[in-house]
C-alpha cells in the first residue's frame, strides 16, 4: 500500500470501546490492574500493558505505531520534543569516554546539546563537513559510538549523501542517526538508505499546524544490536534481541529522564499525519517556485535551495528525496540591516523560529538560533549576518512572491 | 503439548505450533512489540512463523513498550 494510504488508514482503527474514528486521548497518569501479579508482569515486561504515563500511554503508543508504519520501522518512541528525541537516542548509544561524529550543519539546539550537555558528561565530538563522505570515515576513532547528521543542514541547506555515509558507518559497525525533520518520511525512505535511527521533531511538518511540540525516534531495524558497540545495548540484546536499543531508550533513558510526549500532544500531532503527503507536496512546490523567484530578484544576492539546479547538492537531493526538495529556503540580502528590514516588512510571513507550519515563517538565524556562535562559526553553518531563513508555507504562491517583493523593494544593496 | 510460558506450565491443545500461532492462541496483545525467548535464546521476529514448538519448550515474552507496526496494510 502507498504512503498516502498508510498515513491515513495505517494503525488507526476505530476505538474498540466507543467506535470513535480518531484514537482518543487517554489523559490518565496511571493505569489500574486487577491483581498484584498482573501489575508486576507489566512492570517486568512479561505482559503488555500501560502502568504509568511517564513510561507509556495508549494515545502516545497509537501515534508511535502510526509513525512506525510510515517509516517501515522496527519500533518507534515518541518524545517531549525533537531535542528530546536527539538527546534520548544519543544518551542510549553513548556514555562517558565515548565519541560521536557530527555533521557541521546542524540545528543550533543540537549544537548546544553537544556543547553544553554531552561534553559536560565526558562525551567528545568531531565535527565534519556535512557533505564530505570521506571526512566521516577519517574522523572515526576506536571509541566512536554514533554518527549524527541531518537530511538537510539548516540554514545552509546542504544535503549529505546519506546512503554513502551509511555505508561508511556500516563498514565500521557504527550506528548512524539521522534527523529527518526537514523532509519527513514522505520524502525520504530512511530504511532503504541504511539509516540506523531516524529522529524527527514532530513539531514541524508531521504535526503541520505549528501547535504542538514533540519528537520521535524510530529504530529501522538496519543494525544488529547483538554486536553493538555500546556495551549496555549489547548486554540488553541478550534479553531483548533486536529490540535492545528500543528497550534501552524507553526503559532506561526516557522513563528515567522523563522526556515523554504528553497524550494531548500525541493526539494533536497524529492528526497531521492524515494530510502530511498533501502538505509536503505543496510546501515543496511553493518553495521551488519562490526560490526561482528569489534567484531572479535584483535585491537578493544569494539563494540556497536544493531544488535549484545551481545548488551544489542538487543531484544528491534529487535522487535522495524523489525529485522534491523540502520547504526551506535561505536567502542573503547584503547586510544584517537589510535582513532585518525584510523580516520586519513582510506581512504574511511571520517572524518566529519554527519550520513546517502552514504559514510562511521567517527568522534571522545568526541573531537567534546561532546567537552564541562566533561570526565565523555561524557562517560555516549558513547563518551569515545577511541571511534570512524562510519556511515556506501553504499560501498561494502569488501572494508570497508579492509579500517578499514588497519587503525587498525597501532595501539598498 | 505442555509448554512453560513466562514460567507457568500450560497445556496447549495442539500437536504442531509455531511461535506466531502461539502468540495468537495466547491472545498476546501487540505481538509486534514482543521479544520472544525460546529455550533460553532470543529469536528474531523474522523466524516466528517458522519456529516450531515442541513439548516441554520454555517460552518467555518480553515487551519493550513502544509503537510497532501493528499490521501490514
Image: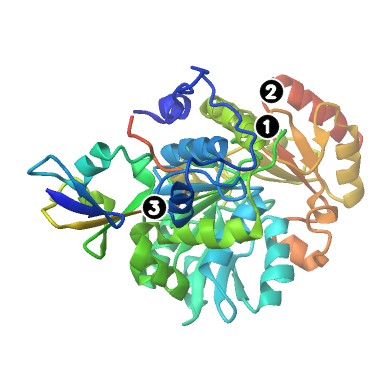
Residue A364 position within the rendered picture, expressed as x and y whole percent measured from the top left: 82, 48
Left/right of residue B22 with respect to residue A287 in the rendered view: left
Task: Characterize the local packing of mark 3: few (<14), some (14-19) or many (20 or more) Cα atoms within 10 angstroms.
Answer: some
Badge 1 and badge 2 in a common chain:
yes
Task: Characterize the local packing of mark 1: few (<14), some (14-19) or many (20 or more) Cα atoms within 10 angstroms.
Answer: many
Left/right of residue A15 with respect to residue A308 in the rendered view: left
Badge 1 and badge 3 in a common chain:
yes
Left/right of residue A25 with respect to residue A375 in the rendered view: left
**Could you tell me which chain the residue with mark 3 belongs to?**
A
Point 45% across, 62% down: residue: A165
Q: Quadrant of residue A183?
A: top right
In front: label 2 or label 3: 3
Residue A4 position within the rendered picture, expressed as x and y whole percent measured from the top left: 45, 26
The residue at which mark 1 appears reads as A290
The residue at which mark 2 appears reads as A397
Residue A406 position within the rendered picture, expressed as x and y whole percent measured from the top left: 86, 28
Q: Which residue appears farthest toward the front when viewing the image?
A: A35
Label 1 and label 2: CA atoms lie apart by 7 Å
Q: Can residue A129 be seen from the camera position used here? A: no
Q: Are marks 2 and 3 in contact (CB under 8 Å)?
A: no
Q: Nearer the viewer, residue A354 or A105?
A: A354
The residue at which mark 3 appears reads as A46
Q: Quadrant of residue A24?
A: top right
Q: Secondary structure at mark 1?
A: helix
Q: Which residue appears farthest toward the left when viewing the image?
A: B15
Label 1 and label 3: CA atoms lie apart by 54 Å
Residue A106 position within the rendered picture, expressed as x and y whole percent measured from the top left: 65, 58
**Could you tell me which chain the residue with mark 1 belongs to?**
A
Q: Nearer the viewer, residue A79 or A165?
A: A79
Q: Secondary structure at mark 2?
A: helix
Q: Which mark is residue A36?
A: none
Q: Are marks 1 and 2 in contact (CB under 8 Å)?
A: yes
Amino acid at each position: 500500500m502507498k504512503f498516502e494510504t498508510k498515513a491515513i488508514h495505517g494503525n488507526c482503527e476505530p476505538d474498540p470501546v466507543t467506535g470513535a474514528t480518531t484514537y482518543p486521548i487517554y489523559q490518565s497518569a496511571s493505569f489500574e490492574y486487577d491483581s498484584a501479579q498482573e501489575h508486576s508482569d507489566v512492570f517486568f515486561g512479561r505482559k503488555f500493558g500501560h502502568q504509568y504515563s511517564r513510561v507509556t500511554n495508549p494515545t502516545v503508543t497509537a501515534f508511535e505505531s502510526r509513525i512506525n508504519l510510515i517509516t517501515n520501522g522496527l519500533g518507534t518512541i515518541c518524545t517531549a520534543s525533537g531535542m528530546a528525541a536527539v538527546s534520548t537516542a544519543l544518551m542510549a548509544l553513548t556514555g562517558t569516554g565515548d565519541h560521536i561524529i557530527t555533521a557541521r550543519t546542524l540545528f543550533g539546539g543540537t549544537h548546544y546539546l553537544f556543547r553544553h550537555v554531552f561534553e559536560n558528561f565526558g562525551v567528545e565530538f568531531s565535527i565534519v563537513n556535512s557533505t564530505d563522505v570521506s571526512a566521516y570515515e577519517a574522523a572515526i576513532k576506536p571509541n566512536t559510538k554514533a554518527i549524527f547528521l541531518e537530511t538537510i543542514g539548516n540554514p545552509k541547506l546542504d544535503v549529505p549523501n546519506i546512503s554513502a555515509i551509511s555505508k561508511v558507518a556500516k563498514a565500521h559497525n557504527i550506528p548512524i542517526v539521522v534527523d529527518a525533520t526537514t523532509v519527513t518520511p514522505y520524502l525520504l525512505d530512511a530504511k532503504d538508505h541504511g539509516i540506523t535511527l531516524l529522529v524527527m521533531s514532530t513539531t514541524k511538518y508531521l504535526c503541520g499546524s505549528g501547535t504542538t511540540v514533540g519528537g520521535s525516534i524510530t529504530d529501522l531495524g538496519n543494525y544488529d544490536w547483538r554486536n553493538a558497540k555500546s556495551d549496555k545495548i549489547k548486554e540488553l540484546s541478550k534479553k531483548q534481541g533486536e529490540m535492545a536499543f528500543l528497550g534501552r531508550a524507553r526503559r532506561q533513558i526516557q522513563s528515567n529522564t522523563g522526556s515523554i510526549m504528553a497524550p494531548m500532544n500525541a493526539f494533536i500531532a497524529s492528526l497531521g499525519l492524515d494530510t502530511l503527503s498533501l502538505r509536503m507536496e505543496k510546501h515543496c512546490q511553493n518553495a521551488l517556485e519562490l526560490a526561482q523567484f528569489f534567484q531572479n530578484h535584483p535585491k537578493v544576492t544569494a539563494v540556497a535551495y536544493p531544488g535549484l539546479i545551481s545548488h551544489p547538492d542538487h543531484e544528491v537531493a534529487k535522487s535522495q528525496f524523489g525529485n522534491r526538495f523540502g520547504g526551506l529556503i535561505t536567502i542573503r540580502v547584503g547586510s544584517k540591516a537589510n535582513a532585518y528590514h525584510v523580516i520586519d516588512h513582510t506581512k504574511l510571513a511571520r517572524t518566529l523560529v519554527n519550520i513546517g507550519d502552514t504559514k510562511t515563517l521567517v527568522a534571522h538565524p545568526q541573531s537567534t538560533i546561532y546567537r552564541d556562535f562566533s561570526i565565523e562559526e555561524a557562517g560555516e553553518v549558513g547563518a551569515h549576518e545577511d541571511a534570512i531563513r524562510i519556511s515556506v508555507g501553504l499560501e498561494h504562491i502569488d501572494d508570497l512572491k508579492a509579500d517578499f517583493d514588497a519587503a525587498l523593494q525597501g532595501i539598498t544593496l | 503439548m505442555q509448554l512453560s510460558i513466562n514460567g507457568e506450565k500450560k497445556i496447549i491443545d495442539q500437536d504442531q505450533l509455531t511461535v506466531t500461532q502461539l502468540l495468537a492462541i495466547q491472545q498476546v496483545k501487540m505481538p509486534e512489540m514482543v521479544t520472544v525467548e525460546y529455550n533460553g535464546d532470543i529469536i528474531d521476529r523474522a523466524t516466528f512463523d517458522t519456529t516450531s514448538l515442541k513439548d516441554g519448550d520454555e517460552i518467555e515474552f518480553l515487551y519493550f513498550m513502544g509503537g510497532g507496526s501493528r499490521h501490514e496494510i
